[in-house]
Image (spheres, helix red, strand yellow):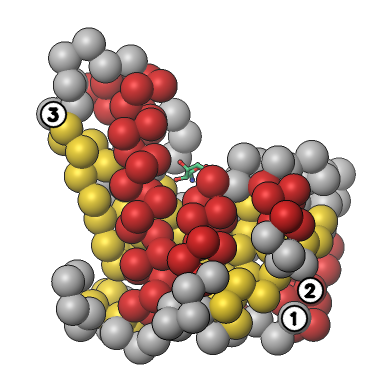
Amino acid sequence: SRVAVLISGRGSNMAALLAAASVPSYPAEIALVVSNRGDAAGLELAAKAGVPGRVVPSRGRTREAFEAELQSALEEARVEYVALAGFMRVLTEGFVRRWEGRMVNIHPSLLPSFPGLDTHRRALAAGVRLHGCTVHLVTPGVDEGPILAQAAVPVLEGDDEAMLAARVLEQEHRLYPAALGWLVSGHAWLEAGRAVVAAEGA
Ligand code: GRF
């Protein structure tokens, strides 16, 4: 299956997906990387990996204009699935519906705890003992879609935001390729508003 990865910055999750997809047995091919910012570091990583990268600028445009160009880029690349990876732009309901069941996101918390930004700082402030990351199908409500997979990490005495973020990120890089693989290979799907996962080792 042909997958596009949408980024806005560093692109370490994108890099983890590219690495997974470079293994012949992996069920997805990363056909396109799209960034809504021209200065996203992830674009260079994609170029080095030989994956087509494209900038679709979002700044100073309406969401509709941005998404029209994005949709064209996805269609031109004959993309079947979309993986959001540190993509910082909220998508309209119309766009999300068009990709229903075929668009996933990774979020750096154990949803439904800590949707939105600054998840690691908020987890530390709340004093939770477990934190982690979630891969979910994208629905119009931000960080609200059906959960495909989660990984938990301990919050340790003396953790600061950077230490906790690094511990979670290591799990993100493991979890995201696995969950995307289940979806594109038909081992996970959307059914009656929930994600069903029938994958081995899920
Ligand atoms: C990750 O923590 C991801 O979960 C969140 O934003 C961060 C992006 O990092 N949505 P990267 O661009 O994948 O390195």
Mark 1 crowd level (few <14, some 14–19, many ≥20, 10 Å Cα):
some
Residue 69 drawn at (x, y percent)? 82, 68
- Using the numbered discs, state the Cα–Cα distance from disc 2 to disc 1 in whole angstroms: 6 Å
Q: Is the C-beta separation of discs 3 and 1 under 8 Å?
A: no
The amino acid type, in three-letter code, at marker 3 is Arg
Q: Do the residues labelled 2 and 1 touch (CB within 8 Å)?
A: yes
Residue displayed at 32% across by 27% down: 164
Q: Earlier in the sequence, mark 3 or mark 2?
A: 2
Q: What element carries label 1?
A: loop
Alpha carbon separation for disc pair 3 and 2: 42 Å
Type of amino acid under label 2? Ala
Residue that label 1 marks: 77
Q: What residue type is labelled 1?
A: Ala
- Residue 67 disc label: none
Which residue carries the number 2 mark? Answer: 73
Image point 44% across, 29% down: which residue? 118
Against 106, residue 27 (above or below) is below
Q: Which numbered marker is on residue 129?
A: 3
The quarter of the picture where residue 60 lies is: top right
**Which comes before the other along the chain, label 3 or label 1?**
1
Relative depth, front residue between 95 and 154: 154
Closer to viewer: mark 3 or mark 1: 1
Residue 92 in sight from this viewpoint:
yes
Whether residue 101 is visible, yes or no, is no
The image shows residue 195 at horizontal and vertical percentages of: 28, 75
Q: Residues within 10 Å of mark 2 (few under 14, many from 20)?
A: some
SS label for mark 2 = helix
> Image point 61% across, 72% down: which residue?
30
